[in-house]
Amino acid sequence: MEELRVLVVGFRKGLCAALARRGVPFALWNATPRPRSKAVASCVSPVGRAPQRVRAAAEQLAPSGPFTHVIAGTESAVVPAAILRRKLGARQSPVSRVLRCHDKLAMKQHLAKHGVPMTAFRSAGARGENEDGAAQEQVLAELGSPVVVKIRTSSGGRGISFARDAEALRAIPRRGRFFEKFVDAEEASIESFIHRGRIGFTNVTRYLTKGHVNLVPADLAPDLHAELLDLNRRVIEALRIEWGMTHLEVFLAPEGPLFGEIALRPPGGYIMELLDLAYGGDAWAAFAAVELGEPPAFPSAARSACAVIILHPGAGKVLAVQGLEAVRGHPAVVDARVRVSPGDAVAPRTGVGQDVGRVLLRAADRSELLSAIEFVDRKLAIAI
């Protein structure tokens, strides 16, 4: 049996803990020190695809190898991990395929050719292009107002802006961005474990309040649920994803589900914790398994209705935290944490990965869960 040795790019606590439980030695490349990660070696430098960064990390960590596998834990790590697999002789993935799962414009252009339904989009062009008034009006005519402006390689909602007129469009930097038609619809996501090109497990997450309340599993009508699973399968097949974990975001539009984007890495938003709670499995162990070339051992049916309430009160100075103990006493609350106290400063929220705490809930059914969510919303307050 092959002796496993892993390089983790981009720290994820659950992944490192899963590898440690298995006794798999791993090294870590991360932007900040993680002394408690149990890594056998570490490279502390910004994670990115720039050749000099990848080369420096490879040179520093190669003596801790040889590595059989390189695993990306974060969005910024996906492309560097693919490059490092070649440099270090680890299990390889086609870089072109990985790029399509990282660059949202390339992703949409590829999937549109495969007939995947999605909202209208177009390239933002380069500096100096599309900057005359007629060009701005053409974008607005094609996509409507507001135009959604996204960074091609961002995640978690970072860098999204909205342009409502030609003047606003003209002021937006073009480099690394694309334009998209605004969709006013509920959103959901689909999480999958993939082994040898086959989907071994799928979950649908409902965004009850985007960026704040996620439900696992989603409480959708059977026909809609089937449509989402079919869309997920089509996207994975079109991108020819052979292994790993995917997180596909979708708009539940009146005309039918519309593809938003897909990530080839574990989701944020405490969805991994919700998968464990709802299904009674170990999502990080399943992720580690598919990355190591093994089938995922994860229950196929949910046992409970679960949710997370992600806390962020907005920017400012914390005046008070109210109702935390009452929330912790509710029978549906599994865990409630607030990481700020009166006097602490809270930075503006630039992405859904930023929060000051969360409440995890588990209930027997949807009605009980929604009642518990309402209780938390009513009782827990972070005054700014």
Image (cartoon, rainbow, N blue to C red):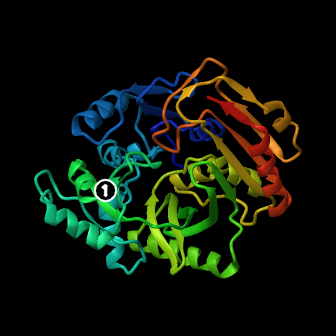
Q: Nearer the viewer, residue 341 or 358?
A: 341
Q: Which image quarter is the C terminus in?
A: top right
> Does residue 339 lie above or below 330 as drawn?
above
Camera-nearest residue between 55 and 102: 102
Which of the 4 image quadrants contains residue 181? bottom left
- Taking 133 as reference, is 44 left or right? right
Q: Position of residue 295 (x, y in %)?
A: 60, 61
Q: Which residue is mark 1?
A: 95
Up the image or down, 226 lies above or below 101; here it is below
Q: At x 81% / y 47%, what residue is drawn?
A: 375
Q: Is residue 69 visible?
A: no
Quadrant for residue 51, please give it: top left
Relative horizontal placement of residue 173, taking residue 116 as reference (left or right): left
Picture coordinates of residue 303 (x, y %)?
81, 61
Q: Amino acid at mark 1?
A: Val
Q: Position of residue 137 (x, y in %)?
A: 21, 66
Up-down relation of residue 167 to residue 232 (above or below): above
